[in-house]
Image (cartoon, rainbow, N blue to C red):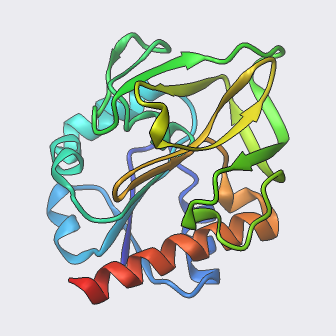
Amino acid sequence: MIGVIDHGAGNLVSITNALTTVGEDSTLVSSSQELADVDAIVLPGVGATGPAMARLQETGLDMALRSWSGPLLGICVGFQLLFDRSDEDHRPCLGVMQGNVSEIAGRPLPHTGWNDVDHTGDPLFSGIPSGETFYFVHSFAPVPRDDEIVIATTHHGDTFVAAARDRNRIGVQFHPERSGASGTRLLANFVSMVRTSRRVA
């Protein structure tokens, strides 16, 4: 069971439908107590980090996410929330990945549309050629302190991070649930990681 965090600003229907398509059950999570029954977490997001972070703090999910050690996938704003702070709202985020979130260099903003994503061969992209296109809608992107966690990049005005991994914590700046067959494959790869984690546990 994958818990999809409901912080008031996520594509909840799209992501739960996409997880169903790849054969995984999911449940919406709006309180820390509900995490007791899930094997993994998806932290989606649209809009801005500030309101999403405020909602997580109101529900206690901020502390629960900081202490979570299982598989976690952040999507778009959910990816940005994993870092230390965001220039968008000039406030702290979850801080489970080191680095800040900054405005991307390209114009116009928001950056909206399909971009080629070059990846390093991380298992998240298994079966997906480097240079495959994914769908983006954003103006900000994480700038990790450690380049070694970067597993994919793309370009809009300048190169920026499209995906990163720090152990079980993974984030993508694009929307896999809106990225056609490549996005479906990526979510299937994440589900495969979750199932492997279950067997190890």
- Judge whether residue 50 can be spotted in this image: no
In which image quadrant can residue 186 be found?
A: bottom right
Estimate the x, y position of residue 88 in percent, counting from the top left: 50, 15
Of residues 48 and 150, the one drawn nearer to the viewer in this rendering: 150
Rendered-image quadrant of the C terminus: bottom left
Horizontal arrangement in the rendering, residue 116 relative to residue 191 (left or right): right
User: Which residue: 72% across, 73% down?
Assistant: 127
Horizontal arrangement in the rendering, residue 87 relative to residue 131 (left or right): left
Estimate the x, y position of residue 58 in percent, counting from the top left: 21, 37
**Compared with residue 117, is residue 52 higher up or lower down, i.e. above or below?**
above
User: Which residue: 38% across, 45% down?
Assistant: 7
**Compared with residue 83, is residue 135 higher up or lower down, i.e. above or below?**
below
User: Which residue: 29% across, 89% down?
Assistant: 199
**Compared with residue 163, is residue 26 higher up or lower down, i.e. above or below?**
below
In which image quadrant can residue 156 be found?
A: top right
Rendered-image quadrant of the N terminus: bottom left
Count the marks: how many? 0
Estimate the x, y position of residue 110 in percent, counting from the top left: 74, 23
Horizontal arrangement in the rendering, residue 193 relative to residue 31 (left or right): right
